[in-house]
Image (cartoon, helix red, strand yellow):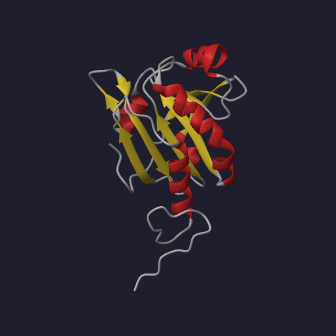
Amino acid sequence: MLMIGNSTPDLEVEALMPDGRFERLHLGALAGRWAVLFFYPKDFTFVCPTEIRGYEAFAPRFREADAALLGASVDSVHVHRAWVEHGLGKVSFPLIGDVTRRLAQAFGVLLEDEGVAARATFILDSQGRVASVTANALDVGRSAAETLRLVQAFQAGGLTACEWHPGDGLLVAA
């Protein structure tokens, strides 16, 4: 798994864009801004839509924090489109199709036996390096609110206490 401080692999991926188009994206182009890349196992499942809808609810706040938001699963972009059109609903951030599993492998989150990505979240700093990585078992969803709080804490540029939120002071090292 990519660890803290590792650079983001500069892979080219295909994504379903918010306007319904398919587009090739270079992950290296994310450098210069913060990004959240979250992997989920599969479309048309039980826990995954709750997470994507959760991230969608917080998407405006990620944009306010100048953090790009990207979802990724081993499904194709065509399956993503079908899911958006027939159940999931509109999404305002790209959904990456990773049928080759190269992206999940590059980030170290491919669960070989299941053939899917782990439920993993990477926060990438503005230099394209991993600032945070979390991974859950497939049956437990994540908190978009906590991911946003972490992005904001990293962007605060100092020592932040447990449960720090924007507006709270930074800790001062003695």
The correct choice, above or below, for 66 with respect to 42 in the image is below
Quadrant (top left/top right/bottom left/bottom right) for the C terminus: bottom left
Q: Residue at x 61, y 32 (%)?
A: 94
Residue 157 point in image, percent of width and height:
53, 69
Q: Most extreme residue toward the front, as rendered?
A: 163
Q: How many marks?
A: 0
| Residue 65 visible, this orientation | yes
Q: Residue at x 57, y 70 (%)?
A: 168
- Picture quadrant of residue 4: bottom left
Q: Is residue 69 left or right of residue 100?
A: right
Q: Residue at x 47, y 76 (%)?
A: 171
Of residues 34 and 52, the one drawn nearer to the viewer in this rendering? 52
Q: Most extreme residue toward the bottom, as rendered?
A: 174
- Picture quadrant of residue 110: top left
The correct choice, above or below, for 171 with respect to 54 in the image is below
Quadrant (top left/top right/bottom left/bottom right) for the N terminus: top left
Of residues 86 and 2, the one drawn nearer to the viewer in this rendering? 86
Q: Residue at x 36, y 29 (%)?
A: 138
Q: Most extreme residue toward the left, as rendered?
A: 113
Residue 112 point in image, percent of width and height:
28, 25
- Picture quadrant of residue 115: top left
Residue 82 point in image, percent of width and height:
61, 13
Of residues 82 and 129, the one drawn nearer to the viewer in this rendering? 82
| Residue 125 visible, this orientation | no
Of residues 73 and 129, the one drawn nearer to the viewer in this rendering? 73
